Image: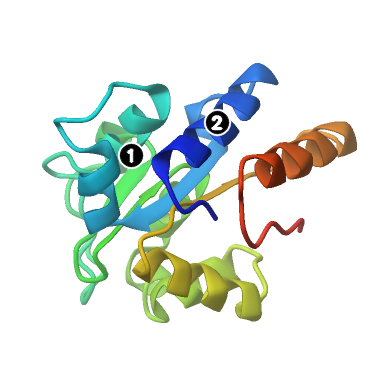
């Protein structure tokens, strides 16, 4: 979890340096955080592009009904959850979209727990997102990458760095 765009961008670059692309990285933030750090008047970057993907028309999953609006293939791997005020980009977004309403019945914590994150950590991430933080995660391809990312995330001021 990162408190600002600069820290998140540096961590994202560490992922890119190891050959991980936008499709490998999960990014979660509030819509308000996206507008603040990655809005139209901010610098163009790969992470910014990823954050903006979920803002497009037809890329929403209704927070109450969980109905999918538009085809998931058309929006890639980013979704906006307007009822929860969230933007989720990456493999987790595709899983949530595929789950439809079932993926959202427990809110963000339920969705994160369903993806294998312990409930205690999911609650920490949810609180952090509500406080304006950016949550980023990746499934490392090997133990060497896992160690590298853990060290890099901490070096770039990440908080609540966990391995699963």
Whether residue 94 is situated above or below residue 15 in the rendered picture: below
Which residue of the protein is positioned furthest toward the right in this rendering? Answer: 143
The x, y position of residue 135, in whole percent, is: 50, 54
Report x, y in % for residue 11: 59, 35
Q: How is the image coloured?
A: rainbow
Closer to the camera, 45 or 146? Answer: 45
Of the 4 image quadrants, the one containing the C terminus is bottom right
Residue 147 is left or right of residue 40, and the answer is right
Q: Secondary structure at mark 2?
A: helix
Measured along the vertical axis of the image, is residue 45 above or below residue 67?
above
Q: CA distance from mark 1 to mark 2?
A: 15 Å
From this view, report whether residue 2 is shown above or below residue 11. below
Viewport quadrant of the N terminus: bottom right
Quarter location, residue 162: bottom right
Q: Picture coordinates of residue 131 (x, y %)?
A: 37, 68
Say which mark, if any, is on residue 98: none
Q: Residue at x 34, y 43 (%)?
A: 78
Q: Nearer the viewer, mark 1 or mark 2?
A: 2
Answer few, some or many: residues within 10 Å of disc 1's Cα (few below 14, many 20 plus, some between 14 and 19).
many
Which residue in the protein does label 1 denote?
Answer: 51
Are there few (<14), some (14-19), or many (20+) residues within 10 Å of tag 2? some
Question: Dividing the picture into quarters, in which one does residue 41 lie?
Answer: top left
Q: The residue tagged with tag 1: helix, strand or loop?
A: helix
- Pinpoint residue 138: horizontal percent, then vertical percent: 63, 42
Residue at x 25% of width, y 33% of height? 74
- Judged left or right of residue 73, residue 36 is left
Q: Are marks 1 and 2 in contact (CB under 8 Å)?
A: no
Q: Nearer the viewer, residue 139 or 155?
A: 155
Q: Residue at x 62, y 79 (%)?
A: 119
Residue positioned 48% across, 29% down in the render: 22
1 or 2: tag closer to the N-terminus? 2
Q: What numbered label is drawn on residue 10?
A: 2
């Amino acid at each position: 979890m990162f408190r600002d765009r600069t820290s998140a961008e540096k961590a994202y670059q560490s992922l890119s340096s190891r050959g991980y692309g936008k499709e490998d990285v999960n990014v979660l933030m509030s819509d308000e955080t996206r507008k603040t750090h990655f809005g139209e008047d901010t610098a163009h970057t790969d992470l910014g592009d990823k954050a903006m993907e979920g803002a497009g028309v037809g890329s929403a999953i209704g927070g109450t009904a969980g109905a999918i609006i538009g085809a998931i293939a058309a929006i890639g791997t980013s979704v906006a959850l307007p009822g929860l005020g969230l933007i989720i980009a990456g493999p987790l977004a595709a899983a949530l979209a595929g789950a439809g309403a079932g993926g959202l019945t427990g809110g963000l914590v339920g969705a994160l727990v369903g993806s294998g994150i312990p409930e205690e950590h999911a609650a920490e991430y949810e609180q952090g997102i509500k406080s304006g933080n950016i949550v980023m995660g990746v499934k490392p391809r090997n133990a060497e990458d896992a160690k590298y990312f853990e060290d890099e995330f901490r070096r770039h001021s990440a908080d609540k760095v966990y391995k699963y």
